[in-house]
Amino acid sequence: MAAMLQPQIILLKEGTDTSQGKAQVVSNINACTAVADVVRTTLGPRGMDKLIHDDKGNTTISNDGATIMKLLDIVHPAAKILVDIAKSQDSEVGDGTTTVVLLSGEFLKEAKPFIEDGVHPQNLIRSYRTASFLAINKIKDLAVSIEGKSLEEKKSLLAKCAATTLSSKLIGGEKEFFANMVVEAVLAIGNDDRLNLIGIKKVPGGNMRDSFLVNGVAFKKTFSYAGFEQQPKKFLNPKILLLNIELELKSEKENAEIRLSDPLQYQSIVDAEWNIIYDKLDKCVKSGAKIVLSRLAIGDLATQYFADRDIFCAGRVTEEDLQRVAAATGGTVQTSVNNVIDEVLGSCEAFEERQVGNERFNIFSGCPSGQTATIVLRGGADQFIEEAERSLHDAIMIVRRALKNSTIVSGGGAIDMELSRYLRQHARTIAGKSQLFINSFAKALEVIPRQLCDNAGFDSTDILNKLRQKHASGEGANYGVDINTGGIADSFANFVWEPAVVKINAINAATEACCLILSVDETVKNPKSESAQGEAAASAMAGRGRGGANFRGRGGRGMRRR
């Protein structure tokens, strides 16, 4: 009786939404599985694309997991974790973004029946972390190093890695063409880590095969004044002057005050303005430079002046392009034209202005520093070129990673099947519940080859059985799905390779996300406090408004009385 009369304890504000316990964990797992289902069909060479239309009317067609996850406006707090791991995989490795979301979703799906049966999430988390550690060590054992090869061999190996990445993209039909282009571009920037040294310029029109690589810098012709047509458009071994100043006739500021005792003195002020600009232009010409680029405007007077002296000039060059020209030609951007010495001038073997599609491009090639490259992309629709750029970004990242961490593993689901076999074998040596959990982790890894088959329209059960049999025989560690024939094939022999770091990062991130979601057992949502803040802010604004109105009113009456 006394227990019934005890007052209810109110801990949180009225209207607070709380959900906890087993149901909450299962609900989070369902949300994450739904997100994984969105990108599921984009995996692999036969993956489908997604068309995303946002509220601003922009349309994006993409096959890239990270891009799709960014554009999906996910509001579920647990499902947002999957967006974060896709972004981290994209920034860390560049490829494998769909893989990481799929793996994470599958780990959670395998964990769901255990949670429903009353297994404590911490037991699952412990086993998953152990399985992840074992899997990553196994990848390191299976990885093949490409270190110590000659440059030509290395190039062909890197091109294979790039081709594997590009095969699942929209430009997969021309993967060899673009793979070689990407490898050349990455090798051109050498050991420099800055991605912005590889420029990608998009020109609508033409077809994919019209795309080309410039071992140097290319950028669109900037806004030009009269006299530009008379300038030479081609130079061999020119000196290049890079500026960050305006070469325009600057009149006095509007609020400047000049007092003259004699009207004739006014002419001397006008002459001084002209002398300043002519002095700057003379110094540019005397420096011996044949090409003058500036981040700020180069006016019509300067354009005509340079044209008369056979010098090419371009103003309003973007900061990024100017920095890339400086890196490539060995020049230094100057903020003054005084004392321009030879050391600050850049040089290149050839410069020309060329028509690409309906745009004109300034192209600097044969640069001495050579630490930059530009890919000019051609294609039909704008969305197509945008997607091609995203695909090349992935390929560039992969080639950079393969150069740095020079170990590769076989793709096409081969490494996943081998890890699955290894973990299943290991699970048999463990007593207790952990055996089941590690087995479920091993089963989840099979989602990659299974999804590759489903997306290509093959019978996944049949192919997975063949793969299990081949891997269990002990000699089929490199066997994966053969997308072309619908059977199984040696992925390593077929050059379906990917850097080991992609798989290591994907399994690490997917396991971490899965463990994080499993460890959350309560969600507290407090919409009341948000709306209360909103109302308070609104009433404060309204109060200020009324105060202002009353004040104005009194002022008005006061005026009339007077």
Image (cartoon, rainbow, N blue to C red):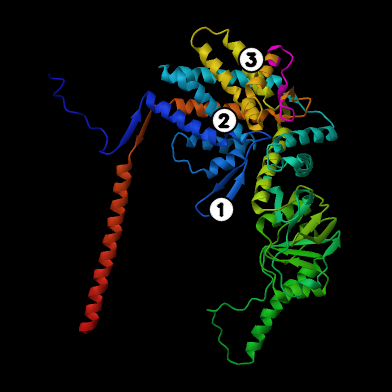
Give the percent coordinates (x, y) of residue 326.
73, 55
User: Does 415 lie within the magenta span?
Assistant: no
Q: Residue at x 52, y 50 (%)?
A: 54
Q: Secondary structure at mark 1?
A: loop
In the image, is residue 242 above or below residue 555? Answer: above
Total marks placed = 3
Name the kind of residue labelled 1 in the image: Asn
Q: Secondary structure at mark 2?
A: helix
Which residue does the numbered mark 1 point to in the structure image? 58
The numbered disc on residue 422 is 3
**Would residue 449 be found to the left or right of residue 209 on screen?**
left
Q: Residue at x 55, y 15 (%)?
A: 439
Label located before the other in sequence (2 or 1): 1
In the image, is residue 252 above or below residue 177? Answer: below
Give the percent coordinates (x, y) of residue 355.
79, 61
Quadrant occupied by the N terminus: top left
Cβ atoms at labels 2 and 3 below 8 Å apart? no
- Circle 2: is it few (<14), some (14-19), or many (20+) Cα within 10 Å? many
Label located before the other in sequence (1 or 3): 1
Front residue of this view, candidates 227 and 255: 227
